[in-house]
Amino acid sequence: MIKTAFYDAKEYDKPSFERYGGLNGVEFRFLETKLNEDTVALARGCDAVCVFVNDTVNAAVVDRLYEYGVKLIALRSAGYNNVDVQHAYGKVHVVHVPAYSPYAVAEHAAALLLTSVRRIHKAYNRTREFNFSLNGLTGFDLHGKTVGVVGTGKIGRIFVDICRGFGMNVIAYDRFPAKDSGIDYVPLDELFERSDILSLHCPLTDETRHMIDAAAIEKMKKGVVILNTSRGALIDAEALLEGIKARKVGAACLDVYEEEADIFFEDRSGHILNDDLLSRLISMPNVIVTSHQAFLTEEALNNIAETTVSNIRSCFDNDGICDNELCYRCGNIEQCKKARRERCF
Ligand code: NAI
């Protein structure tokens, strides 16, 4: 049995991980707490840790895992900005789930967009109170509008297809444009200037952090709708709030938030929320916040569990080679072992 400390476990995680783990010799120790420097000791005696988006796997945590003899950090997410991958090189292997259901995330972005522009969130509450007035519920057609997509990877491409289905004009920006995709790529500033709707689907990196800041919002069309189902820190939330207050930003739909780590995924009703910025955003009639739930479909949960268990198995089996091991950016490009399908270390 490969003993795996499963941090930040939620009720919806357990059935699929128990099922696939049981079938493949991986025993999960489910822990409600998130992984950080205070909780890393709970991984003592385990072969691997399984972590999610709000676990903190910085250099200090990596060093402690190494000290405890933990061999593997298995992310059950696609994004890995919360792991110091370079520091893990030579110490602890890191794997992730590159794709589990890009449809889940792209469809959630579309759901947020439709909810926002047709005021469904308002109408739902009204009719529950038997208020059948239409005042203030006027939306706009998506057909013919220009949507700017930032990041045309797995999720972004599906979102592009959904938008085309609505008859929208799609323009995109990607640091690495997809060749022969038929997508109309434009520079980022032009995307800001032309988009009626802007949807973020790129990873969080040093380069993309706060890519939507006051200067970017300044360039946008009045009334722009901003969707973020990627990572919270792509947006400077204070600048977004100012843009909303200035009536420049017409609506914002946020599945992620920069400071979500201690808030999202938990029931905070009945508590006083200490985050004034998030409270203010939520109080706005044209802001919709979901709690990092874009991935949450039956299909995605099954795929995440199946791939994570398979990743863990591969790392502990025979040659230890796992296709989903991350690149540690070790700098040894000429002799890249990963490219030769060998273990990095
Ligand atoms: P992907 O790796 O297939 O695509 C990312 C795209 O972003 C690539 O085309 C890449 O070239 C592009 N990119 C990289 N740097 C860029 C830059 N500086 N500017 C513009 N584009 C850049 O990733 P995938 O699967 O499409 O996921 C996208 C993001 O969605 C993930 O990084 C993750 O943060 C987020 N995500 C959110 C989930 C949720 O539940 N809300 C669930 C899964 C992913």
Image: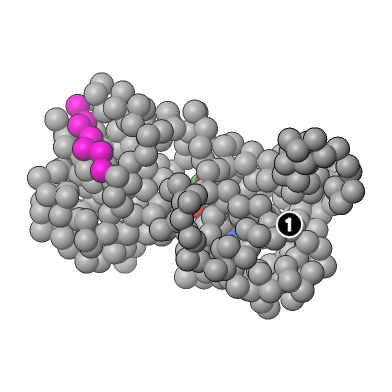
Relative placement, left or right, of 48 versus 252 is left
Q: Which residue does the image show at 40% across and 42% down from the upper left?
A: 97
Q: Position of residue 92 (x, y in %)?
A: 20, 54
Q: Which residue does the image show at 41% across and 33% down from the upper left?
A: 12
Relative placement, left or right, of 167 versus 189 is right
Q: What type is the residue that disc 1 sits on? A: Pro
Q: Position of residue 155 (x, y in %)?
A: 58, 45
Q: Which residue does the image show at 37% across and 34% down from the upper left?
A: 11
Q: Quadrant of residue 212?
A: bottom right
Q: Which residue is mark 1?
A: 285
Q: Position of residue 228 (x, y in %)?
A: 61, 55
- On screen, residue 162 above or below 283: above
Q: Is residue 95 among what the camera can see? A: no
Report the span colored magenta.
25-31
Q: What is the chief secondary structure element of the magenta stretch?
A: strand
How many numbered marks, from 0 up?
1
